[in-house]
Every structure is written in C-alpha cells, then in structure tokens.
Amino acid sequence: MADHHQHHHQQTQQQPIMKSLHDSSPSTRQIVRILTAATIGLSLLVLSGLTLTGTVIGLIVATPLMVLFSPVLVPAVITMGLLTVGFLFSGGCGVAAATALTWIYRYVTGKHPVGADKVDYARMRITEKAKELGHFAHPQTHQTTTTNH
C-alpha cells in the first residue's frame, strides 16, 4: 500500500513536468509563423543590400559626369528649384485669394459660411469697445475744446 502511495505521488509530480514541457513546445502554427517571418525578413535584407550596392555603383559611374557638367547643372538645378517654388507659392496665394473672396461673397449674400458667427461676434465686440472708447474720448475732446477757447 505504501508502495502504491509512493508510485501515485511520483506520478503526480511528473505530470506537471510533462505537462509544462508539452505546453512550452511550439505548435506547428507558431513554427510556420517564425519561418515565414524569417524568410520575409531575410528576403528584405538581401533586397536592401542589393539596392545599396546598385546605388553605390550608380554613384561611382555618375560622379565623373557630374564633375564634368557641374558648372552647368548646379545653376540649372538652382534656377529650376527657384522657379518651381515661385510657381507653387504663386498658385497657393491664388487659391487662398479665391477661397477668401468666395467666403466673403457668401458672407455678404447671407449664405452664412463657416466661421460667420465668429465674425459677427467679433464685429459686435469691436462695436461695443468703440462705443465705450467713444464715450470716454468724447468728454475729453469736449473739455479740451472748451479749455482752448
């Protein structure tokens, strides 16, 4: 009986060990995921290496041409860059002006464009402040005109 109890005790102690070994081993799905990720990663690494090599070879081949034509190319690139920036800025200003004029037209015709309520509130506040300053300024101007006479 003691032998049976000891055998049962050993068996229960070994079950968690066997169970943890079985649980910690990766499943087939995990192995496939790891292999796929490794294959894709290695392929991308090889591709980036080939791209770097091609870029360096192209630079080595093109350097003498760039040195020969640099007195012409550098000013041409600068000019083209300035022209491009100028045209883009001009177009942007034109779009902004057209947008502003469209907004003003809608506001004046009463179509209530986005932000019209803020403009109305600001106009009301400015009018109130102008009236307040007008009341303060009016007695002072009246006093200065009477004291000058």
Image: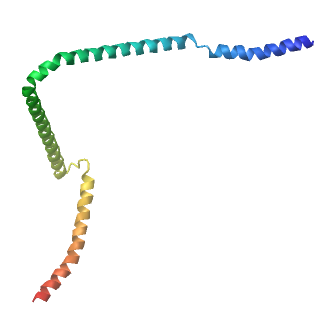
**Relative horizontal placement of residue 146, taking residue 3 as reference (left or right):** left
Which of 106/21 is in front?
21
Q: Looking at this rendering, what residue extends furthest in the right direction?
A: 1
Q: In which quarter of the image is residue 8?
A: top right
> Residue 74: x and y, percent?
11, 29
Which of 22/75 is in front?
75
The structure's colour scheme is rainbow
Q: Looking at this rendering, what residue extends furthest in the left direction?
A: 72
Quadrant containing the C terminus is: bottom left
> Residue 104: x and y, percent?
16, 50
Q: Tell me which residue sits at (14%, 42%) in the image.
A: 93
Q: Quadrant of residue 19?
A: top right
Vertically, is 112 above or below 45?
below
Q: Tell me which residue sits at (10%, 26%) in the image.
A: 70
Which of 83/93 is in front?
83
> Residue 14: x and y, percent?
76, 14
Quadrant containing the N terminus is: top right
**Relative horizontal placement of residue 89, taking residue 1 as reference (left or right):** left
Q: Tell me which residue sits at (90%, 11%) in the image.
A: 3
Q: Quadrant of residue 126?
A: bottom left
> Residue 4: x and y, percent?
88, 11
Q: How many marks?
A: 0
Vertically, is 75 above or below 127?
above
